[in-house]
Image: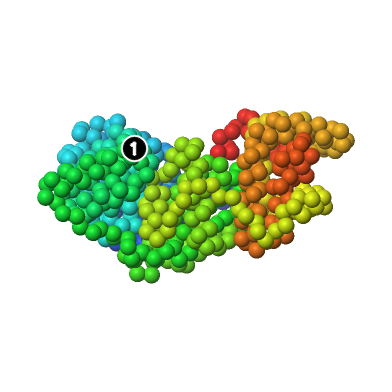
């Protein structure tokens, strides 16, 4: 009997089904008011549907669907996929696509590093001036209803070229609209003189007592003489036009932050500070700032979220605490750390993200931020006794057994050379070595990779001991203090904490090499 061969069923193409699911999901988001947190969660669910999300989103833009365009553009930014740039550039020159959608596309392209000022906007847009004016009017309407949207505008402005920044601020002033005053007041405070100068000039174009009040504050309270001089000139111009000063403090009833958290210091000297305010413009909602600060570089990054629930905020902190130690702290301590960070920004001329100036403005409604270095007192500890305790000094080697220090290792291509030199024949493990060879390794490694940054490590230990004390971890704080107090010993490689740092650095490098990652050959994998 002839053997019967079963035919294979044709493979089902689910792309049309996925496309419909994506379209339905996008439509469901169109008429819903969501917080940024909720939108991000919605985006995660959207991209889990399948690989067709980006093609579907691009197709909706080509179809000139203005209603769904805001959701689609948000999704394309959320994707963080640079492959969208080329098709978006193609859509920009399609005559069938409206200026409103093209304006949103330009915002997405800015997110991907495209300088819109270098594009032929007069050709791309059917009526560029009208589009710019309409967009500006919509933006002013939005921040009037919820000023906590200002940080998002500052984020976009921060990414513009200087030429675009100045043109944007000039257009803002040309509106002669009181609703622009809160935004211009923040821009006038940034540590970027040409931008601040243009914002002050824009305030001078708004013939309003409120604008005059803000200019008076800048002329009398700014720490920069040039800012004072320009603000005084613009205020005099308004007075000559018959404008009388009108009190304007839109944040005067804002309460202090209700939630303040601080993280431990990581292996490169960075930590995160959270401050959350009750949003007075949205019932039962919080607006909060995440601030990345460095022990030697000051404020490095700032990002905020407007209109989230307390549950969402707590969830965000909880997620972060899975990989980093986080503790509550009081507002005074947070302000002290902030002043310390700003001291380094100022003395070392490190730029500050524009968004930070909004949150700084809020803090300064009820707090004074002193831009000065912070030196913990450790009044509850006998520092002399700790420094003379040799057993405590030896135990600094074991600090790496605690989660507070599990990422304190040196990440540098040269570490991989040391790892290769000291690799065991049995695999990616540190080989056994005599006391003399170990001391030689510690001496070379310390001289090359630790001593140039010894002051930074010392500062990290000092602030970590302070953090541990604030978190109630007094025994670990004591051992960390001991490590800090011995950072001036000679030679430094005799320090047990430094020896363990070297061992951990080489172990991490060996493990990375085992898994195919080597900083000497693929440094981009470690960014």
506 or 198: which is nearer to us? 198
Asked if residue 87 can be seen in this view, the reply is: no
31 or 215: which is nearer to us? 215
Q: Quarter of the image holding residue 268?
A: top right
In the picture as drawn, the residue positioned furthest to the bottom comes out as 284
- For disc 1, the marked residue is 193
Rendered position, 379 above or below 434:
below
Q: Would you call the spot at circle 1 few (<14 residues within 10 Å), some (14-19), or many (20 or more)? A: some
Asked if residue 332 can be seen in this view, the reply is: yes
Left or right of 509? Residue 148 is left
Left or right of 186? Residue 277 is right
Left or right of 345? Residue 138 is left
Rendered position, 461 above or below 159:
below
Left or right of 357? Residue 198 is left
Q: Where is residue 173 in the image (x, y as percent from the top left)?
A: 21, 44
State how the image is colored: rainbow
The residue that appears at 49% across and 61% down in the rendered structure is: 331
The residue that appears at 50% across and 60% down in the rendered structure is: 332
Q: Position of residue 353 (x, y in %)?
A: 42, 44
Rendered position, 272 above or below 442:
below
Q: Position of residue 235 (x, y in %)?
A: 21, 46
The residue that appears at 43% across and 43% down in the rendered structure is: 352
11 or 276: which is nearer to us? 276
SS at circle 1:
helix
Q: Position of residue 64 (x, y in %)?
A: 24, 47
In the picture as drawn, the residue positioned furthest to the right comes out as 434
The quarter of the image holding the C terminus is top right
The residue that appears at 47% across and 67% down in the rendered structure is: 311
């Amino acid at each position: 009997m002839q053997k019967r061969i079963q035919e294979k069923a044709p493979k089902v193409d689910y792309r049309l089904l996925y496309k419909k699911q994506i379209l339905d999901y996008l439509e469901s988001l169109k008429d819903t008011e969501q917080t940024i947190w909720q939108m991000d969660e919605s985006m995660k669910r959207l991209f889990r549907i399948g690989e067709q999300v980006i093609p579907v989103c691009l197709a909706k833009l080509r179809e000139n669907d203005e209603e769904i365009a805001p959701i689609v553009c948000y999704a394309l930014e959320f994707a963080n996929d640079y492959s969208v740039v080329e098709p978006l550039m193609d859509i920009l020159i399609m005559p069938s696509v409206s200026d409103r959608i093209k304006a949103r596309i330009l915002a997405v392209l800015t997110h991907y590093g495209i300088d819109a000022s270098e594009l032929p906007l007069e050709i791309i847009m059917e009526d560029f001036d009208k589009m710019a004016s309409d967009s500006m009017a919509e933006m002013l309407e939005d921040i009037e209803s919820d000023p906590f949207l200002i940080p998002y505008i500052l984020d976009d402005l921060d990414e513009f070229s200087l030429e675009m920044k100045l043109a944007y601020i000039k257009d803002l002033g040309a509106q002669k609209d009181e609703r622009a005053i809160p935004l211009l007041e923040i821009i006038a405070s940034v540590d970027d003189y040409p931008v601040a100068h243009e914002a002050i000039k824009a305030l001078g174009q708004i013939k309003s007592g409120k604008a005059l009040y803000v200019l008076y504050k800048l002329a009398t309270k700014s720490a920069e003489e040039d800012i004072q001089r320009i603000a005084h000139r613009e205020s005099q111009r308004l007075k000559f036009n018959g404008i009388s000063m009108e009190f304007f403090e839109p944040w005067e009833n804002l309460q202090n932050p209700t939630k303040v958290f601080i993280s431990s210091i990581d292996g490169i000297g960075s930590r995160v500070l959270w401050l959350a305010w009750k949003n007075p413009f949205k019932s039962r909602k919080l607006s909060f700032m995440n601030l990345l600060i460095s022990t030697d570089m000051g404020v490095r990054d700032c990002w905020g979220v407007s209109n989230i629930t307390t549950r969402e905020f707590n969830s965000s902190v909880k997620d972060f605490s899975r990989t980093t130690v986080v503790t509550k702290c009081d507002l005074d301590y947070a302000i002290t750390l902030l002043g310390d960070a700003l001291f380094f920004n100022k003395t070392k001329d490190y730029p500050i993200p524009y968004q930070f100036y909004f949150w700084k403005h809020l803090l300064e409604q009820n707090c004074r931020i002193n831009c000065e270095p912070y030196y913990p007192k450790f009044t509850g500890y006998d520092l002399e006794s700790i420094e003379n305790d040799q057993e405590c000094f030896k135990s600094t080697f074991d600090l790496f057994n605690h989660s507070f220090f599990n990422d304190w290792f040196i990440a540098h291509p040269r570490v991989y050379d040391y790892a290769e030199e000291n690799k065991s024949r049995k695999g990616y493990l540190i080989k056994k070595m005599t006391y003399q060879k170990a001391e030689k390794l510690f001496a070379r490694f310390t001289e090359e990779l630790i001593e140039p940054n010894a002051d930074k490590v010392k500062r990290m230990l000092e602030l970590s001991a302070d953090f541990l004390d604030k978190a109630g971890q007094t025994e670990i704080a004591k051992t960390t203090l001991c490590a800090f107090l011995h950072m001036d010993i000679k030679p430094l490689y005799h320090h047990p904490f430094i020896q363990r740092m070297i061992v951990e650095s080489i172990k991490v490098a060996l493990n990375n090499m085992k898994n195919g990652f080597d900083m000497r050959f693929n440094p981009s994998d470690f960014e």
